[in-house]
């Protein structure tokens, strides 16, 4: 029932000029709430279907295969084991697109999770690029643009990884990892120079574990007509990052 129908029902009940009873008011409010919920759900589903259709076409345009909500070959799927995928609850993957380029197996997908519950719950959704390569191994790490809260928390908890010779890195990023010494080894001076040279306005989140590097902007879903640009940007980040790892490993 629509909101107008609920209002009409209430008007009909009181058309004789009498005041509506408390039961009638509660009933009408319940109908309005239910109608609002159903309308919101229908709108959300319609927008989701529209986005899926647009991304299906966009995937074809960049030479990728649209795989929907999962990877057709789970053995070749990226391991979702970095910081992003451990946040919140009600995790959801949608609009998975798979392809290859620059020596990587590449996956692009929408990923969302929920924090909190009830009236205070909030959903965070972003488009993620995953770059997998069998001949690399990354320790678990997460790097994001540092904000005031990150810096204040680090002053108290000392969880961020710092490089004394490169203070700019700590000013730009909050870098954390399960094994700090392994992460320090990964971030050689050349790699630190590379990440500090990235455009700060892009606010990239870069995370790694095993043979996969993840690049995304927090709470930012990519518009279908910007998919090519997103792929190019994230590929440049992944290529530069991994190329430095390769050079360091062969020296």
Image: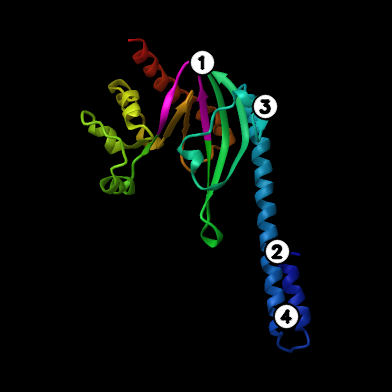
Give the residue furthest to the left. 165
Does residue 22 show up magenta in the picture?
A: no
Q: Earlier in the sequence, mark 3 or mark 1?
A: 3
Mark 3 vs mark 4: in front: 3
Taking the spot 28% from the left edge, 43% from the top edge, the residue there is 158
Taking the spot 44% from the left edge, 24% from the top edge, the residue there is 238
Quadrant where the C terminus lies?
top left
Residue to which mark 3 is pinned: 72
Q: How many marks?
A: 4
Look at the picture and state if 84 lies above or below 102: below
Point out which mark residue 103 bears.
Answer: 1
Taking the spot 24% from the left edge, 29% from the top edge, the residue there is 166
**Range of magenta residues:** 128-141
Judge by depth and name the residue closer to the eye, 127 or 74.
Answer: 74
Residue to which mark 4 is pinned: 24
Residue to which mark 2 is pinned: 35
- How is colour applied across the structure in the image? rainbow
- Residue 85 lies, in percent from the top left, at 51, 39
Q: Are marks 4 and 1 in contact (CB under 8 Å)?
A: no
- Residue 137 lies, in percent from the top left, at 44, 21
Kind of element beneath mark 1: loop
- Residue 32 lies, in percent from the top left, at 68, 68
């Amino acid at each position: 029932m629509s909101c107008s129908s609920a209002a009409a029902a209430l008007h009909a009940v009181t058309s004789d000029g009498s005041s509506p009873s408390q039961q009638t008011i509660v009933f009408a409010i319940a109908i309005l709430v239910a109608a609002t919920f159903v309308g919101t759900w229908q709108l959300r589903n319609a927008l989701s279907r529209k986005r899926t259709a647009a991304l299906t076409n966009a995937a074809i345009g960049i030479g990728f295969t649209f795989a929907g909500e999962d990877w057709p070959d789970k053995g070749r799927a990226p391991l979702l084991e970095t910081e992003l995928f451990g946040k919140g609850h009600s995790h959801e993957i949608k609009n998975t697109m798979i392809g290859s380029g620059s020596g990587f197996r590449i996956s692009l997908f929408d990923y969302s999770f929920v924090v909190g519950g009830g009236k205070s719950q909030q959903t965070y959704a972003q488009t993620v690029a995953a770059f997998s390569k069998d001949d690399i191994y990354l320790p678990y790490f997460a790097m994001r643009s540092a904000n005031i809260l990150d810096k204040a928390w680090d002053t108290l908890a000392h969880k961020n990884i710092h490089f004394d010779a490169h203070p700019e890195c700590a000013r730009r990023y909050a870098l954390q990892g399960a094994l700090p010494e392994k992460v320090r080894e990964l971030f050689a001076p050349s790699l630190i120079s590379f990440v500090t040279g990235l455009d700060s306005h892009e606010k990239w989140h870069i995370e790694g574990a095993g043979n996969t590097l993840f690049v995304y902007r927090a709470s930012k879903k990519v518009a279908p007509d910007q998919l090519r640009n997103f792929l190019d940007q994230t590929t440049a980040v992944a290529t530069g990052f991994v190329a430095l790892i390769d050079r360091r490993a062969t020296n």
